[in-house]
Amino acid sequence: MMPKPLDYTENELLAVLSARELTDGQVVFAGIGIPLLAACLAQRSTCPGLTILFEGGVIGASIEPGLLPPSTNDQRGARRSSMVLGSSDVLLLMQRGYVDVGFIGGAQIDRYGNLNSSVIRPRPGQPEIRLPGTGGGNDIASLTHLIVAMKHQKRRFVPEVDFVTSPGWLQGGDTRARSGLPHGGTLRVITELGVFGFDAELKRMKLERLNQGVSVDQIRTQTGFELLYGPELSTTEPPTAAELLLLRSLDPDRLLLA
């Protein structure tokens, strides 16, 4: 008898798939929300040696289940941490090459992995929309290999972002390095529809794995630019019962997982 498929939300899927991209021993600069949940899930499962950094100055965070910090400056994030420094000192660690992966989201992303969290330019009949801005997003994207977790919608996956808050591969090819950013670049984009990488030469977004029950046509419909993809696409493994149990213990009030 086949087991009944597990029920999970899109946010739970994002967190689980994102956590699987991390490797034990890495140093991860995590943003709040899904990136934080994913990093904590990885730390409590497959990556016990994962070191989590916050923009507010925390190094080696170990989040207590049920007490997720609402911002990178909240002292709940400092529980059992290795050290608490000033924000500038944490950002300097990235400049010195001590951080492996940056983990953030955004309001818009384009074919080259550039992120916008600053402003949505006016459309006909719509006003300009101001967004929270960069915080440490520019530093993280400029100095690390970036993992992006975000919802997959055509208005978010755009041909060109309205504002480059956090640089990906800029205009593709070697433009990032020629612009003075020789290290890092957008490594993965994870959505409720699939997992995406970037072509080694063009640096354009490339579909690598479909989530279960999702077709290429569905992804095309929700993407505002032409995607690259290979002739044979694999399918991601859905979240396991163990992963979901651990993830839900981190956010029992479902503040982020709903």
Image (spheres, rainbow, N blue to C red):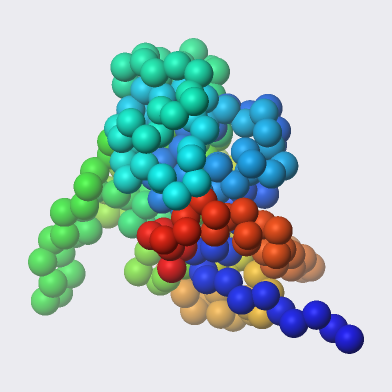
Q: Position of residue 128 (x, y in %)?
A: 13, 61
Q: Quadrant of the C terminus?
A: bottom left
Is any part of residue 138 visible from this angle? no
Direction from residue 192 to residue 56 in the image, left or right = left
Residue 160 lies, with reference to residue 24, above or below; the image says below
Q: Position of residue 193 (x, y in %)?
A: 57, 70
Q: Foreground residue, 12 or 104? A: 12
Q: How many numbered tags mark residues here?
A: 0
Q: Foreground residue, 152 or 111? A: 152
Q: Foreground residue, 30 or 130? A: 30
Direction from residue 38 to residue 123 in the image, left or right = left
Q: Position of residue 15 (x, y in %)?
A: 55, 55
Q: Residue at x 41, y 61 (%)?
A: 253
Q: Position of residue 200 (x, y in %)?
A: 66, 43
Most extreme residue toward the right, as rendered?
1
Q: Residue at x 61, y 76 (%)?
A: 7
Q: Residue at x 48, y 40 (%)?
A: 64
Residue 176 lies, with reference to residue 16, above or below; the image says above
Q: Quadrant of the N terminus?
A: bottom right
Q: Residue at x 27, y 54 (%)?
A: 162
Is any part of residue 133 visible from this angle? yes
Most extreme residue toward the bottom, as rendered?
1
Examine the image and state in which quarter residue 173 appears: top right
Direction from residue 103 to residue 159 in the image, left or right = left
